[in-house]
Image (spheres, helix red, strand yellow):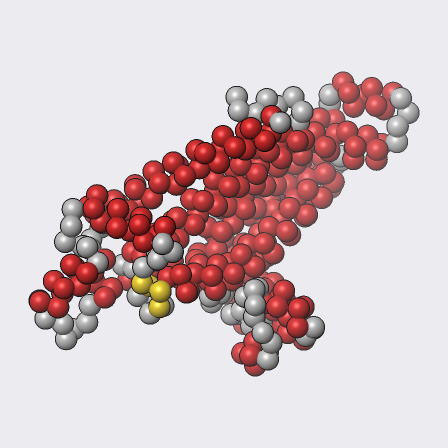
Amino acid sequence: MQIRDYVLRRLIILPILIVGTSIVVFALSRVGGSPIGIYLSHEMTQEEVAQLEERFHLNEPLPVQYVYWAAGVLRGDLGWSGVAAAPVTQVFPQKLAATLELAIAAGLVAVALGIMLGTYGGARRDRLADHLVRVFSISGAAMPIFWLGILLLIVFWVNLGWAPIGRSDAALYRRIAHPTNLYTVDALMAGDLRAFFDALRHLALPAVTLGYGTTAIITRMMRSSLVEELNEDYVDAARAKGLPERIVLRRHARRNALIPTVTVIGLSFGFLLQGTIVVEIIFRWPGLGRWMADAVLRGDQATIMAYVLFTSVLFLVVNLIVDVMYAYLDRRVVLGT
């Protein structure tokens, strides 16, 4: 009952936070200049430009412009993407699917590897394995993502030719249907293993690049939390009862060590989506990040606002999920305080 009430309270606050964020971003985008430029051509006259401004309500005061934009969003109209030369609502699902596939792949690798390495290093404190884990976590947190991406690109694409760039081989892409726009999922649904492994080959380098820094952060948090938990009295009591060390580690210490780690994991997924901008540019991945970068360079405010709206909702939802998971792992937490 307590968790349900907490979730309901957060869901009530959620629209208020989204509206507040959208107002700030909308105002800042308009201060940077009018979005009319994305609709213009060299052949247009001053009268045609004025007609466009009137059509899109760009001649109205800023608050009125926001009201028209918000009303369009509620109708499912996010505007026209000048970068893609199509409505935002038509392009967004395809770009989102590409970014989600990349972020999910990177996130799964980061969570699995980070928890495993953190547990391995924390259980062997101050031994060689622990030192190697700490070197890995420090280097991953300090290494710029663009530098790692370029390095992997030179080694595995340019020199070895093992991992291609882009998202898929064109011929393999055309021979299967794409109901989800997640190429790996679509290939499995079509029963085409060749297309599936081709999608994995294209996904490998950008996923490793994107997930490396997050893996290091999760590893470091998991190791530190586990070392702290292993020094607690309840661990000594479990050992005194004669429980095997692996049981003490898995059922007692690691469960409690996961509590602060879950918070990092939840927030990291949101940052993974934002980190795709650099990765998608380097590896020519046709996702939200690359689309957003092109939109910023061309002043495509409709695309920018759609991206900001999506990321705002994403972070708020992820924070809600993390809080609920935190309470589930730690029964001492009083939700809503």
Report the residue at 73% width, 33% height from top. Answer: 254
Q: Is residue 225 visible?
A: no
Q: Position of residue 322 (x, y in %)?
A: 57, 36
Q: Nearer the viewer, residue 7 or 22?
A: 7
Toward the left, the furthest residue is 46
Report the residue at 76% width, 34% height from top. Answer: 123
Please say if 27 is above or below 188. Answer: above
Question: To which quarter of the image does residue 117 belong?
Answer: top right
Q: Position of residue 127 (x, y in %)?
A: 75, 36
Is 275 on the left or on the right of 260, as rendered? left
Is 153 on the left or on the right of 162, as rendered? left
Q: Position of residue 228 (x, y in %)?
A: 68, 26
Toward the front, the furthest residue is 75
Q: Nearer the viewer, residue 202 or 83?
A: 83
Q: Which quadrant does the N terminus fall into?
A: top right
Question: To which quarter of the image does residue 252 belong?
Answer: top right
Please say if 106 is above or below 167. Answer: above
Q: Nearer the viewer, residue 43 or 295?
A: 43
Report the residue at 8% width, 67% height from top. Answer: 47
Q: Is residue 319 visible?
A: yes
Is 65 on the left or on the right of 265, as rendered? left
Q: Position of residue 25 (x, y in %)?
A: 31, 45
Q: Nearer the viewer, residue 108 or 25?
A: 25
Is 256 on the left or on the right of 315, as rendered? right
For the image, the number of numbered tags is 0
